[in-house]
Each structure stands twice: as C-alpha cells, then as structure tokens.
Amino acid sequence: MAQKVVGTGARSGAPVVCVIGGGQLARMMQEAAIPLGIELRALVEAEDGSAGQAIPYSTVGAADDRDLITGWVGGNVVTVEHEHIPDPILREIDSRPSADALRFAQDKLVMRSELEAPHPRWYEATSRAEIDSSIAALGGVAIAKTPTDGYDGKGVAVVRSAVDVPWEYADGERILLEEKVEFDMEVALLIARRLSGEMKAWPLVQSTQRDGICYEVIAPAPVDQALLDRATEIATTIAEQTGVVGVLAVEMFVVGDRLLVNELAMRPHNTGHWTIDGAVTSQFEQHLRAVLDLPLGDTSPKAAWSVMVNLLGSDLEDPRQALGAVWEADPGVKIHMYGKEVRPLRKIGHVTVSGDDLESVKARAHEAIRILEGK
Amino acid sequence: MAQKVVGTGARSGAPVVCVIGGGQLARMMQEAAIPLGIELRALVEAEDGSAGQAIPYSTVGAADDRDLITGWVGGNVVTVEHEHIPDPILREIDSRPSADALRFAQDKLVMRSELEAPHPRWYEATSRAEIDSSIAALGGVAIAKTPTDGYDGKGVAVVRSAVDVPWEYADGERILLEEKVEFDMEVALLIARRLSGEMKAWPLVQSTQRDGICYEVIAPAPVDQALLDRATEIATTIAEQTGVVGVLAVEMFVVGDRLLVNELAMRPHNTGHWTIDGAVTSQFEQHLRAVLDLPLGDTSPKAAWSVMVNLLGSDLEDPRQALGAVWEADPGVKIHMYGKEVRPLRKIGHVTVSGDDLESVKARAHEAIRILEGK
C-alpha cells in the first residue's frame, strides 16, 4: 500500500544539501535537516535502505558513478557519508570536506606521514620482507593496517610476522605497521569546522571497542582537565591543517598523560551519536551548519553524563519489536534504530541514556541493549 | 533534479503508523518516527507540502475520502493530525484517538455539556433571539464560538449582540456563548494516554496568544505547586473520561486560584512544541508510543526553563535564508521550520531556547523570531 510520492524538486528558498551515502549517517542527518527546513538529497544504494526510508528526495546510484553524481549534484552543496568516493569525483563536485582534506581520512599512510600530531611509532612497508623488518623494529608485534578502505575492524590485524596478515597481500602493495599501543583508554574528540573557518568542539568522550567496532561511548571522558585541553588542542590543529569542512572525529589512545592519534574520520562519527540526545547541538545539525557555512551551534552537554551503546546485530528477527520491552524496563531510554536488517555484528541501532550518576546511566544503557539483542 | 523514489512498502518488522493530515504536526511526528524505526505513512493534501517533504511514504488524498482512506490504512494503526475527519470514517478505521473521544475535541458544545471539568459559564443558542438572551445572561458581553471547525482564532468572536457574530449565521444553527473570562494567565496541560490506559503528563505551561493564535509558550508555567497539581488532576480526569489515546492538550484559564477549561485538542499541540528540545520525551514521540500501545516516556524537562515562540508569517520571502543571521546573533537557538510558504499570521515555524534564567531565555527566543520575521 505505502508508496513514496514523486516530488518535484526543491521548495523555493530551501537550503539544499546533497549527501553521497545511504546508511545510518545520512538517515540521522535527515533527522537534523527536517526541523531546519533544509532539503537533504541522498545518493543511496537502495531506495528502501536506511537513508531511503527517511529521505523523500533520494536517488539510487553508486558512489563512483561520475556522470550520475555530477549531474545529480548540480550546483548544490555536497557532502559525504563515507570516504570511499573517487578523488576525481570529489574534486569535480567541490565536496565539503574537500578532496584534499579527505586524503587524510582515506589513506592512513598520508595521515601518519603528513599530519602534524602525536602518532604511535609506525612504518610503511611495501613487501613481506619489509613487513617482517618493521615488526622486528616495533618489538616483535605490530598492528598491520591497509592504508585505505578499512573500517570497523576490517583491514586491521595484530601481527607477529608477514604471514599473520589476514587479507590477501602481494609484494609491492603498501601496508602500515604500527606499534601495538598499550593504552589506558581510547578517547575521541569531535570538532566541527565551518567552511569559512569557525571551529567548535564537543567534550572529549571515552570509547570502548568490541571486536574492533565501537561499542560504548561515555560523554564526557572521565579524565582530568589537562588531558581534555590537550585533546582539543590536537584536534584543533588537525582541523586547521587539513582544512576539513564539517565534523572531524579524532580517535586517540591515552597512555599515561600522553595522547596518540589512532584514526581520523571526516563526517559525523559513531563516537558522536550521544550528541543527538545529550548536547544542545547534535553532530548531524552541526555538520549541516558547517557545510552550509552557517554559524556553528552550542556544543554544551545537556546532562552530567550521557552513555551511548551500539546495537551490533541481534538474536531477534527485528529488534523494533522490542521497543515496548525496553521501555517497560526503563521509559527514559532514547532508542535509535537504523531500519537495517539484522546481521551479526552489524550496526543496526544505538541507545543513549543521560543522567547525573555515571554508573546508573551505563547500567541502564547496557540493559536496554541486552533487551534489543534478545539476550 | 531531486526526485522522490517510489518505495515498495513497509520493511518487514517495522511498526507502521498512518497519520491523516499533511501539516507541520505530521512533519514533526516524522522527526520522532525516524529514530524509532517506525514507518510513518501520511495522507497529505500535496506531495510537496509540509509533511510530504519529510515523509517518503506519503499518499495524496482528502481527509474525507472514505474509500481511499480505508484502503490506505489497511489493518495498520492510524492517528490524526486534526479533528476534521468525518465520524463514520474514524469509526471504520478504528482511529486512535477514537471517534467517541474525538467528539469532545470536534464539538465545543459536546465538550461543555458532557465533560467533567470546571468550565466558564456558557449557553447554547440556536437563534438570534437566544444569542441575545444568552449575552444578557452573561452580563452584556460574551465569547461566541462555532461548535465545530474553529481554530487559531477563526470561529471565535467577542459579541455584545447577535449582530456582532462575524460569520454567516442562520437561525436554527447551534452556537456556543461563553462568559468573557477575565483571566490572569492562559495555561495548557499536555498529557498522553496509552491505548491500554497508562498516562503521563508534562509540566503545566503558560501560553500567550496574539490575534487568537498561540504565540509564546513558557515551560513550566510560573505558578505555584497547588495550581500545577490541580491542572494535572483536571487533565487526568478528562483523559480518563474521554478515553483519549495519544496526546491530549487541555487549555485552561487561570483566574485567581481557579482553573477553567477553555479548549481541548486530541493530538500533539502547539503548546507542546517545546518538548522536542526541552523534555526527555517529546510530545511527538509520546504520541507514537501511545497509539502503538507502548510504554510512555519520561516527561521531565531537560532545563530549568524552555521558551517556545511561534513564527507567524514573515517579511522575508523565505525565512530559511535567515538561519545564519539567527545563529550569528545566538548559536544556541533551536530553529524549527515547517517547509511552508509565507502567509500573514500563518504558523511557518517556531524556535525554542532553554536555560537557567527565564528572562534571558525569553529575550533570546523573541530576538530569534524578530530576525526570522525580517523585522
């Protein structure tokens, strides 16, 4: 019965933002675009996918289809949900962030070699022999990373020898070898930079990974002020150096009183989902403001603590059937479902709980996820 | 270039809610539906209207087209954006709220004669002679109201004689005459009732009208606890008596320490828009939870004070072009635009500001509206 009606284009006067990517980030960007009267147009992989379900003005197409994309964008502002868009297309459509900025997020070797920031020790190798010598130089164990296309634990492995690299590797291919940092905590600093230069950061958050995928985020990170200030300084320097436009996420390791940059993302990021419910301005609204070159919003938290936990797959056929069970146990949980089919370890939703007592907020968020997981 | 893609129906497992009405309420309901993974389907007047712009699964049709509506609803849960849907259709589709509940909001004479609540003094008249005698009994001046179809100041007039009634009136037609209450304040209590009976109220708010249209809302209303309790008691009694499902708005006059019921609405209401930014659970999320018979959410405010001010028309051709100017002055203002064309006194958006100091919060909200009005 339900049918999407066919629209006729932008309402006169509506600011338009085109986003390449049809996943949950475009979907959550739409939640921020509607109240602002911004017409979000999405280039999606499937019309009824996560973003297509929520964005009337969506077009089906591939993120590397140059002719389609350049025509579709027209003269409008365009941003990206992920980094996997070919460089020549990014340049032709004048994307925000730009192709030059996105290089730092697309290629981990560019990040390590060019970024002015504290890094773990690292080596570039281009052969099995170099992989082994790099591992030896790093003390016999290293983290191997594909320079491009890795995400959510894919393209990352702990290695003690070249034979441990779990993906197909051929001599001549570039590979990044990093020291296996014995960190005290993983943290992320999100900052937005507006086209004309203004920047605003949210508080530093702590993130916990499970199988290489972000699982839990605590805002703010329970660390001292000196570390918070240092993290903001590092992210600000990176935002300025790269000239990023939109949200930049800088994931870092805490080792004693030191911070080391782990990863970069130049788009709204999993570690910023807590801002939807927990901050005056969400990362999705801020991203839209930044790419449209509008003044950035207040990044203050609305509660002493917010905890976000990801829903990574579920034993239920559709966890949306468990909304009632979650709220029966705790009516104050904020649930976010992405409209995606369940698959093991796939990010299909998240919950956020805010309050005054960290331990209780954490327990409530995890209990909600346990119910949505069908455990 | 932008085109809505044609969808193929509900994702398996998605809770579905059909809403009759294509205005800003359905649009804001969609903002709440997306994160919950609820598939909202809207029956809209125009595909690119306020709701159609935001809801991919929308169908164009009239709210009195019985065949279309019954087929479109199928066996799904259905709710309404306004009260102007013929009673037989409401009964056939088993609407939430029900036809029996909606009578109280559709017909002010039903409300006055049947509702167990404190009312202003009132008379029903069915002729010019009775209008005049009713006015005399009310002290020479009265508020005349059409029993049905009035809203936003339409169908309401101060009268001193039958000749003052500003709309076409013929003997035999029913008309409501009420005392002109010299109130100290206008307030509204919003409460949600779940299908199976659970109820939760938000704090009482103060509303200020301009030309009969809600203009400013202050949450919570600056009144003493006894009055807050009494207002909640009145609204709870009304919710129970009417068996409303979804959000009920009870607008009341404060006269000294008394409360008198002015109007009822059985849907999310203008006096509840502050809850989007200012409460843990917004009225739109709560309405969806109530009609789907899911446990109701926490209605606590997130800040000491929230002030909402409506944007009623504008001197600008499209106030969305002034987003930057508003945020240049005050980056913390939450702006909500409805995607509607500008017309004098038309509700085309609202802003909400939250904070600790009422006077500053009010001033900030009004300054933002002044900029959006192009004054």
Image: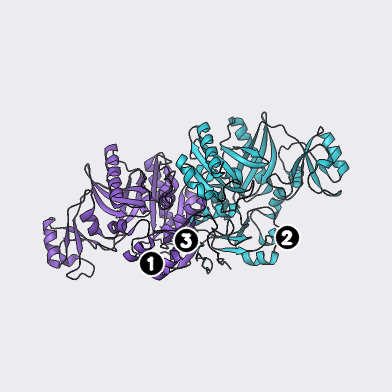
Chain colours: A cyan, B purple
Q: Does residue B356 sit above or below A34 in this rendering?
A: above
Dots 1, 2 in contact, CB < 8 A: no
For label 3, the residue is: B41
Q: Which mark is residue B63?
A: 1
Q: Amino acid at mark 3?
A: Arg
Q: Secondary structure at mark 3?
A: strand
Name which of mark 3 and mark 1 comes first in the sequence.
3
The subunit letter for the residue under badge 1 reads: B
Residue A209 appears left or right of A303: right
Q: Which mark is residue A281?
A: none
Q: Secondary structure at mark 1?
A: loop
Decide if residue A296 is in sight here.
Answer: no
Residue B173 appears left or right of B272: left
Q: Quadrant of the N terminus of chain B?
A: bottom right
Query: Dot 3: within a 10 Å radius of its alpha carbon, few (fewer than 14), some, or many (20 or more) residues?
Result: many
Q: How many marks?
A: 3
The residue depicted at 42 percent of the width and 69 percent of the height is: B68
Q: Quadrant of the C terminus of chain B?
A: bottom left
Q: Does residue B83 sit above or below A205 in this rendering?
A: below
Rendering quarter of residue A124: top right
The subunit letter for the residue under badge 2 reads: A
Query: Dot 2: within a 10 Å radius of its alpha carbon, few (fewer than 14), some, or many (20 or more) residues?
Result: few
Please state which of residues A109 and B131 is positioned toward the viewer in this rendering: B131
Q: CA distance from mark 3 to mark 2?
A: 39 Å
Q: Position of residue B264 (x, y in %)?
A: 29, 54
| Residue that sits furthest to the top in the current view | A256
Dots 3, 2 in contact, CB < 8 A: no
Q: Position of residue B228 (x, y in %)?
A: 30, 41
Q: Position of residue A209 (x, y in %)?
A: 65, 39
